[in-house]
Image (cartoon, grey):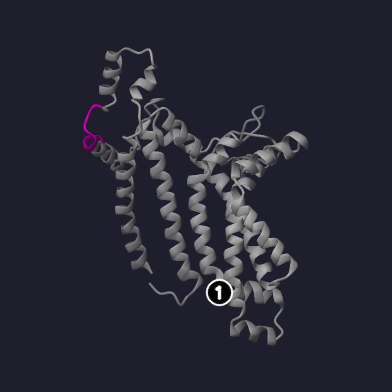
Amino acid sequence: MFAYCMKRAGMLIPVLIGMTLVVFSIIRFIPGNPAQVILGQRATKEAVEQLTIQLGLDQPWYVQYGHYILGLLKGDLGTSIRTGAAIAQEMKPYLFATLELTFFAMLLAIMVGVNAGIISAWFKHSFFDYVAMFIALIGVSMPIFWLGLMGQWLFSIELGILPTTGRENVRNPVDSITYIHTLDTLLQGRFDQFIDSIKHLILPSTALATIPAAIIARITRASMLEVLHSDFIRTAKAKGVRSFFIIYQHGLKNALIPILTIIGLQTGLLLGGAILTETIFAWPGIGRYIYDAISYRDYPVIQTGILVVALIFVLINFIVDILYAVIDPRIKY
C-alpha cells in the first residue's frame, strides 16, 4: 500500500506540470492586454507599453512560464495584476467559501442519492422506485440556473424564509478564523450567526447538489441491484437477518466501489463547476474569483486558481483510489 501511495504521489507531478503548461498556453490566447485593461481605454500607447514591460508580459511565453514554475517551486503563487496582492492570501476566502459550499452540497447529494438508490433497489419496480428514478432523471436534466432562480423566487421572495444571495448577513458579519463560516461561528459560540450561515447555504447547496444526487441515486440503484442478487444476500435473508443489516452491512459495503468512484468524480466537478451557482447566489467562491480574473486578464490569478482546483481534483481521486483497498480487502496494490 505504501509503495502504491508513493507511486501515485509521484504521478501527480507530471500531471500538475502538464496542467500548468496547458493552462498557461491557453490563457495567452485570450484576447486583450492586461495592461490595457488596468489603465483603461483612454490610456496612451506609451503608458500601456511601459506597464506591459513592468508586468513582464513583453517577454516570450516560455520565459514567463519558466518564471512562473520557479515561483511555484519556491511556494510563491504569484501576485495579482489587478490588485497587486499576493494570490496565496487573496485566494483563501474564495477557496474556502467554495470548499464549504461543495462540502454541504455533496453531503446533501450523498444522503439523498445513496438512500434513494438503496430504497429503489430494495423495492425494485415499486411505486417508490419509479418515482425516485423519474425524479433522478429530472434532476440530471434540470439546469442549475433555473433551479436556483426558482428557489430564490419561492423561498426568498414569496415565502421570505431564506436569504436570496450572499454568504452572510452584511449587518452581522462573521469574524473569519478559518474562512469557513459555519465552523468559525461554532468556534466563537455565535449560534445566531451559525443559523444564519446555514440559511445562506441551503439554496445554493441544494441547487448544486441536484445533479450529483440524481447521478449517485442511479449508480447506487444499479450497483445495489447487482449485489442484492448475490448468494450471500440470499443466505443472510434465509438466516433471518434484519433488512437494515442486509442492506447497509452486507449490501452497501459490497456495492460501494462504483458509488465511491462517482462521489469522487462529482466532488471534483463541483469544485470546478460551481461558478454558475456562485454567480446566481452571489457566493464569493473560487469560481467567481477566476471568472473576474478572466474579465481583467489577470493571468497569474487565472493560472493559480485553475491549478489549485486541478490539484484538489487530483487529490480527491487519489484518496478515492486508496479507499478502494480499505473498503474491499480483495483489492491489492
- Residue 137 lies, in percent from the top left, at 63, 57
Vertical comparison of 208 with 112: above or below: above
Q: Is residue 283 visible?
A: no
Residue 135 part of the magenta segment: no
Which quadrant would the N terminus be assigned to in this image?
bottom left
Query: Quarter-wise, where is residue 124 in the image?
Result: bottom right
Residue type beneath disc 1? Asn
Residue 63 part of the magenta segment: yes
- Residue 331 lies, in percent from the top left, at 44, 74
Q: Nearer the viewer, residue 192 or 279?
A: 279
Query: Quarter-wise, where is residue 247 in the image?
Result: bottom right
Position of residue 132 in the picture relative to residue 264 (left or right): right
Query: Magenta span covers which residues?
Result: 58-64
Tell me the SS state at disc 1: helix
Callout 1 environment at 10 Å: few (<14), some (14 to 19), or many (20+)? some
Vertical comparison of 186 with 130: above or below: above
